[in-house]
Structures are given as C-alpha cells and as structure tokens.
C-alpha cells in the first residue's frame, strides 16, 4: 500500500511538504479515538527478544527514529505507535530558527538517498518544553541539542548548557550534536578541544542532579579515522556515555545521480544508501577501540533489515532510521523487528541444538551413569521467549555497569 499508493503521492510533493503532511496526519490520528491503537496494531511488534537494556534504560526494541524528523517532539506517541522503540527529537537550539532558505532538502531516488541543508530549523527550547510536558505514555525520548547558527563557536558551550539544564527533566538521554554545518565545520584538528569545552559543563551540571541522564555524542562520517579515534578516547577519559554514529556526509562519491543534478542541488549532508558502509565501518572502529564496552547508536544508510543486522553485528546497541524509513515507509520498523525476532529464534535454536548435542555426547560417555539429569526436548522447547538472549550479553552487561556507576565515573 505504501509503495504503490502513499509513496507516489508523497514523492510528488517536495520533501518538506511531504514531511508536513505526514506530521499533520500523525497529529490527526492522535486525536481520533483509537487512532494510535490502530497504528500500533498495523505497524508495531512487541516481543521479549526485541527488548534491550542500554545505558540503564529498558528499550522495547532497538529501532529508533533519528534526529531531524520530529524536531520539537510534536508527535511522540504517534511515532511510537508506528513501532519505534525510541525517538530522538531535535536538533533543538535555544532560540527558534528558520534554517536555510528553501529548497533545502532533495531526494536522490536513483541512490535511495537524501541531501539536506535545513540548517537546524526548529521551534526552539521553549516550544520543545511545551511539547515534552504533554503526556507521552513512557515513550523513550532522546533530546538532540545544538547551538543556534548565530552563536559564535566560542559561546557554543552556553547554548548547550542552557538546553541541557532546561530539558534535563524531560529527556531520557541527550545527544550532543557537534557535527552540523553550523558547528565545527571541517576543523577536525580542534574538534577534541571544542567537544570537551561543550561536554565538561554538562557533566558538571549532571553531577548535582539526583537523576542520571546519559550523554551521547553524534559524530560526522567525514571525520578522518584518526579524529574518530581521538573522539572515541573521550569516551574512555570522561563521563561521556556513548556515541551516535553517524550524521550525513558531505562526500558525493559513487552516486548514480548525474553530476549536473548534484551541482544543481548544491551543498548539504547526504544520507541514505550511499552512507551504509561508512557508518557501519565507523561503529566497528569505535567498538574495537573501546572493546565493545560503551553504548553506540548506529545510524546512517540503514535501508533494509540486513543493513540493521550488519550495524548490530558491528557493535551498535541500538539503531536509528531516517532516509530508509522515507523510502520504505511505515512497514519498515515491523520488517526489521521481525527479522531480529527470527535471528533470536535461530540463535535459540542453535543453543538448543548445541545443548542436545552436548547431552547426547555426555550420554554416550556416561552410559554407566544413567541417573545423571539431562535436558529433555520438552524442557528446552518450553524455554520461555523471555529467555531468548541478546546477541551481545557481555557488552550490554559492561554498558549497564558503566551507566549504573555514574557517581564513581564522574
Ligand atoms: C531531512 C533531514 C534532517 C535532519 N536533521 C537532523 C538534525 O536536525 N539533527 C541531527 O543530528 N541529524 C539530522 N539529520 C541526520 C539524521 O539524524 C541521520 O543521522 C542521517 O540522516 C543518517 O541516517 P540515514 O541515512 O538513515 O538518514 C537529518 C537528516 C535528514 C535526512
């Protein structure tokens, strides 16, 4: 239905018009009695095998909506009813800003990609607080925060701190967005110092709070590998909780879209299929460097369940979708969740088979000891779904330990 009816209609509009229509429809569904229930029935999957505990928060599933879609938290319950396990709102800036002149978002259908130079258009801190004060039924909300375009880089830490303090009680976690076009640009050499100037006041503020809010850092895929390593080390050296990898790229290599079209579109961050490999590679690089001990949200070019699998295999604890969702539509979260449930079932099946093989082996070697208790088929088949284990229990235990010991790590 999405591919044949809704997508052609939405794709006949500009991408921003389509976005407004979708947000409006979601809000309308939200006020119709039973609207969210129906959405949930059609799009959401609930299963114990999907649940994840990451930085001390229990996620109903690991598939989130990336920043930039619901910038001010206007349709949280409706988006959650579409099946997402969490929603990252923002980027929010202290004052409202209109962003760059239109047109500023472009589809690249030949590449399953989008280029955007929206420039962090959003309604600002106060409007976001108003939205977050409305009931949102326990939906897990991350707040992605950034500085206003007019704020000079040396004053950026004040913008971030203002947002962090004022949104602290409303968010489940924060993402510090330093990789937008109006932040550090390509000055990677100073990136580490710039980031620390922003993060340290947030850690100071958090120390005085009763409740712990994880702080993630969102990075650009255009950072050279050695800069990614230096930024990864911030995880080891400070109370930073994790990394969101990655934002869109400025690179334009290996695209099917013609050079003329690309020149006409101009600058902006490219997201979608051309980003998949780089985003996965960065997540793997970070997790290798930190021995898989810190939470990573993998985002960038996740267009299919297999892309999500590859991102999780690379070490991501959670994933986020944006461009893949635009191209595939509301069935995508369900499709990904079903694939993850299948994987968990297969993993469980393998465990059962291994247990059986072990049992059979010990039976033959211990024929003279018939009283040794063994796992029967019924025992293993009756294993409740809740016991289906996650793929990376060690890492999650480590991450939990990290997030549950904020005081000692501060
Ligand atoms: C139209 C659009 C707007 C975006 N706005 C933001 C934003 O405000 N803040 C942010 O951190 N990321 C923003 N992003 C980046 C996404 O959150 C995501 O990191 C990126 O698109 C890569 O994921 P994808 O390939 O699945 O789209 C935006 C992306 C798009 C396509």
Image (tube, rainbow, N blue to C red):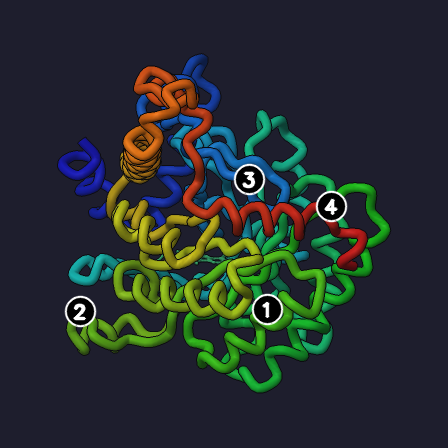
Q: Quadrant of residue 388?
A: top left
Judged by depth in the image, the label closer to the viewer, 3 or 4, is 3
Instruction: Give SS at disc 1.
Output: loop
Question: Mark on residue 257?
Answer: 2
- Callout 2 environment at 10 Å: few (<14), some (14 to 19), or many (20+)? some
Relative to residue 70, is residue 276 depicted above or below? below
Label located before the other in sequence (3 or 4): 3
Q: Nearer the viewer, mark 4 or mark 1?
A: 4
**Label 4: which secondary element:** loop
Asked whether disc 4 touches disc 1, contact meaning CB atoms under 8 Å apart, the reply is: no
Q: Which badge, 1 or 3, comes first in the chain's sequence?
A: 3
Quote the CA–CA distance across marks 4 and 1: 29 Å
Q: Nearer the viewer, mark 4 or mark 2?
A: 4
- Residue 227's place in the image compared with 201, above or below, is below
Q: CA distance from mark 3 to mark 2?
A: 40 Å
Q: Separation of disc 3 and disc 4 at Cα? A: 15 Å
What is the number of the mark on residue 149? 1
Q: Is residue 27 visible?
A: no
Q: Please, is residue 333 above or below residue 228 in the view?
A: above
Does the beta carbon of the residue at mark 2 sit less than 8 Å from ligand 1? no
397 or 109: which is nearer to us?
Answer: 397
The tag earlier along the polypeptide, 2 or 1, is 1
Q: What whole-number distance in Å separates the C-alpha atoms at marks 2 and 1?
A: 30 Å
Quadrant position of the C terminus in the picture? bottom right
In the drawing, what numbered circle is on residue 53? 3
Q: Which residue is mark 4?
A: 212
Ligand 1: quadrant of the figure: bottom left
- Report how far apart the C-alphas of labels 4 and 2 lie in the structure: 45 Å
Of circles 2 and 1, which is in front?
2
Q: Residues within 10 Å of mark 1 (few under 14, many from 20)?
A: some
Give the percent coordinates (x, y) of residue 127: 64, 43
């Amino acid at each position: 239905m999405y591919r044949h009816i809704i997508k052609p209609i939405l794709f006949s509009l500009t991408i921003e018009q389509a976005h407004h229509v979708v947000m409006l429809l979601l809000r309308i569904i939200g006020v119709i009695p039973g609207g969210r229930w129906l959405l949930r029935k059609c799009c959401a999957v609930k299963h114990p095998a999907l649940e994840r505990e990451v930085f001390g928060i229990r996620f109903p599933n690991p598939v989130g909506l990336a920043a930039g879609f619901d910038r001010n938290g206007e349709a949280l319950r409706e988006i959650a009813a579409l099946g997402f396990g969490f929603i990252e709102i923002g980027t929010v800036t202290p004052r409202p800003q209109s962003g760059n002149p239109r047109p500023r978002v472009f589809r690249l259908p030949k590449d399953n990609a989008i280029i955007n130079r929206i420039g962090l258009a959003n309604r600002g801190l106060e409007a976001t607080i108003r939205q977050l004060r409305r009931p949102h039924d326990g939906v897990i909300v991350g707040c992605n925060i950034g500085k206003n375009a007019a704020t000079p880089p040396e004053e950026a830490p004040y913008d971030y701190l203002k947002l962090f303090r004022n949104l602290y009680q409303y968010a489940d976690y924060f993402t510090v967005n330093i990789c937008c076009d109006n932040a550090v640009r390509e000055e990677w050499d100073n990136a580490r110092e710039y980031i620390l100037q922003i993060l340290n006041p947030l850690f100071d503020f958090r120390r005085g709070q009763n409740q712990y809010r994880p702080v993630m850092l969102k990075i650009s895929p255009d950072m050279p590998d050695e800069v990614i390593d230096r930024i990864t080390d911030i995880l080891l050296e400070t109370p930073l909780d994790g990394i969101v990898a990655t934002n869109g790229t400025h690179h334009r290599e290996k695209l099917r879209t013609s050079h003329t079209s690309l020149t006409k579109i101009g600058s902006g961050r490219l997201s979608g299929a051309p980003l998949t490999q780089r985003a996965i590679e960065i997540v793997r690089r970070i997790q290798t460097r930190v021995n898989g001990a810190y939470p990573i949200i993998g985002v960038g070019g996740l267009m299919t369940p297999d892309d999500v699998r590859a991102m999780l295999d690379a070490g991501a604890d959670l994933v986020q979708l944006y461009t893949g969702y635009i191209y595939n539509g509301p069935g995508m979260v369900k499709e990904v969740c079903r694939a993850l449930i299948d994987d968990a079932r297969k993993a469980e099946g393998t465990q059962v088979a291994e247990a059986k093989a072990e049992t059979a082996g010990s039976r033959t070697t211990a024929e003279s000891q018939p009283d040794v208790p063994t796992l029967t088929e019924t025992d293993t088949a009756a294993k409740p779904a809740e016991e289906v284990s996650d793929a990376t229990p060690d890492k999650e235990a480590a991450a939990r330990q990290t997030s549950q010991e904020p005081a000692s790590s501060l």
